[in-house]
Image (cartoon, rainbow, N blue to C red):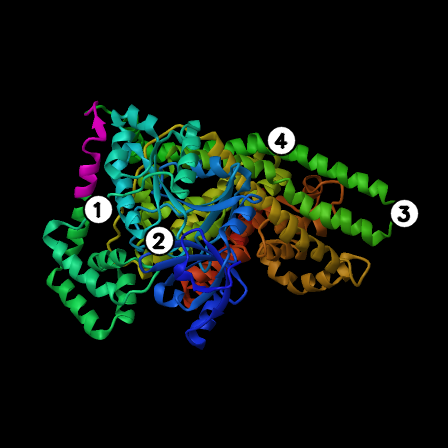
Amino acid sequence: MNDDLLSITSLEEGEEGIVYSLTGGKGLVSRLAGMGIVPGIRIKILRNIGSLIIVLASDTRIALGKGQANKILVVKIQTHDVEAERATEKKSLLVALAGQPNVGKSTVFNILTGLSQHVGNWPGKTVEKFEGVHETEDFDIRIVDLPGTYSLSALSEEERVARDFIIHEHPDVIVLIANASALDRSLYLLSEILILGPPVVVAVNMLDVAEEQGIRVDTDMLHNSLHIPVIPMIAKKNRGIKELVLAIIRLAKGELTYTPRIPDISEDHRNIFHQINELVGEHASPPHPDVWIATKLMEGDPEALEEMKEILPADTWNKIELLLLKHEDALRAVVGGRYDWIEDITRAAVSRHKMGQVLITDRIDHALTRPVIGIPVLLSILAIIFTLTFKIGYPLQKLLELLIGSVGRFFDASLHNAPLWIKGLLINGIIGGAGSVLTFIPLLVIFFISMAFLEDVGYMARAAFVMDRFMHIIGLHGKSFLPMCLGFGCNVPSIMGARIVESERARLLTIFLTPFVPCTARLAAMAFIAAAVFGEKALVVSWSLIALNLLTLGFAGMIMSRFFLKDIPVPFIMELPLYHKPDIRTIAMTVRSRTMSFVKKAGTVILGFSVLIWIISNYPGKNIDNSILGWIGHLIEPIGIPLGLDWKMIVALLSSIVAKENAVATLGVLYGVGDQGLMDVLPNMISHASSLSFLVTLMLFVPCAPTFAVMKREMGSWKWFFTSFIFMLLISYCGGAAAYRIALLLGI
């Protein structure tokens, strides 16, 4: 090592040092310490360009201004020491996948990361975060799949996440996945990404789809126009993936020429842009590039305006504000400049040789987007999905239940000398409770496959379109149908998906109504109990219950829309992606992720709750009636009289607030099914009328705790949150009581 102390601004990109001391006052030292930069820490210089320094400290990328960076003194690690270490370890790269929705970004991500991927949430956000690792001989490439977005204007949570990640994390390489059949739109996103700084590789995907439409993209010509790497790709056929990985590595190593052609402002506003840029450049601090800030100010970006108003001196901000007021068409100049750039880029690179040809998508949409045909087709598709779920899933469920029952009998025989409480806990608590829930898996997998298929081929957007007229009846529009459709899988992402609804009132109403969409957990519990009690009539009963839920949703929407959306016009703008062949790998990864999420819940929340229910149903007395749970159950039993439900079924309903599957798990524990199987025990325990009442109440009952937590966060109002809770409670109770009385009158 060299004993001479250096400022980190003296180090070149790729060089490393050990922090010796920090100067600049307590405020700066405290802030740097909070970011992980303290004496003794090892740091590496990732970028040292202009006024921006990016360092890697404790696996965290930190952007610093030159002024702050000069206060960090280090002992430089000699080159041969670094090279010796690098010879024994792989290098790491941070790569961001960017792109608009429906460009095949998920397919590329799945191929590159495979089983290494994991899903979480962005810090402080409810937007999902997909990460994974692609390993090569010399590199570990950490890949982050940014949310699909049309621009970086921060008009939605997804746009904020994408641009904040690029600005603050400064990835080594950004891969922009572009749709070859709609290249102009993908290039618009590229025009924003290029001015952020990190190197970009453009992967032109779906070339085969473009060819079918008569569009030919010359990627070599595109490369010559953009002066950045351009990779031709057909991701679903695994073509171009290896070339993409090679381009990422070579670009990160500096082996490829990278001189991007940056879009400019329209000529009549360039002078104004340069004036704003100069005013901003004197005061703006990293990590925001000056050009980016000046561009966003001209666009009228609300976040950029607010941030600069706080940072800039009052006189400087007044000058910028005066310039923007004099040129109210500044946004037009920015957008116009980008489209001039796009036209120039694509003029020689894109050719259309079958103009006027009617596409297969157009032919299909000619029928499916008409309400007369589209709505019956949508209902038929849903009918097929639920029919498959019963016809295929139910026999598989029976087989799985027999398997779990045999496991129970095996442990019963093996533990004949064990204490009774151990046998009871294992057989009745764990196997009888959580084991009953695991039999849902065949039903869920069939549903997950069906929905993933429809999403992948591009049908779900058409479903929203044809449902627009019906949604208006309940005070919404077709775009609200998409998050509601997700509710058939799980209400949590469904409620979070309501962010695509622009109107605040329409978004609140969408969240309010979404819990009436039966999630897979409720559907599985309903299918299980209906099949056990009603046998061959289970399909009719199930269809009736689903129809009741949807009718209740419509009724609630018509009532609530009088308060939410009275006299407020609701626009309907959304993209209809082209139909394309399903990608089996993408569908499989989606189904795997959703199924594993359910299995984890069954192995944690539901298992724990089943054990808890067994314990409080067996202590302190020798039987359930004399237990803690029995005491609570008998106390609340009068509530169930109008519903025709005993205290055990009331407890099962209340347990569903934790997780809907708990309703079945709790019944399995309370009725002591053990190795017999709940499907064989349940018909002898409750009547048809009580079963129908229980199912109606369960289907309309308040959602699970995670859904409620997300509802509160997304609504942002205790008033509407409690209104929603009380409304659902009353609807479910009245619905269950009515179902019980009608069933008795009809002799069901």
- Residue 426: image x %, image y %? 77, 48
Nearer to us in this view, 637 or 508:
508
Nearer to us in this view, 636 or 363:
363
Q: Please name the residue that numbered disc 4 is placed on.
A: 395
Secondary structure beneath dot 4 equals helix
The kind of residue on which mark 1 rests is Pro
The kind of residue on which mark 3 rests is Asn
Nearer to us in this view, 736 or 464:
464
Determine whether label 4 and label 2 are within 8 Å by CB.
Answer: no
Q: Please name the residue that numbered disc 2 is placed on.
A: 163
Chain-order first, disc 1 or disc 3: 1
* Between marks 2 and 3 in the image, the one whose residue lies nearer the viewer: 2
Determine whether label 2 and label 3 are within 8 Å by CB.
Answer: no
Chain-order first, disc 4 or disc 2: 2
Q: Is residue 256 left or right of residue 123?
A: left
Q: Please name the residue that numbered disc 3 is placed on.
A: 417
Per the rendered image, the range of residues in magenta is 340-355
Secondary structure beneath dot 1 equals loop
Q: Is residue 677 visible?
A: yes
Q: Is residue 748 left or right of residue 202?
A: right
Determine whether label 1 and label 3 are within 8 Å by CB.
Answer: no
At a point 48% along the width and 52% down the height, the residue shown is 492
At a point 14% along the width and 67% down the height, the residue shown is 322
Q: Please name the residue that numbered disc 1 is placed on.
A: 263
The kind of residue on which mark 2 rests is Arg
Magenta-colored stretch includes residue 345: yes
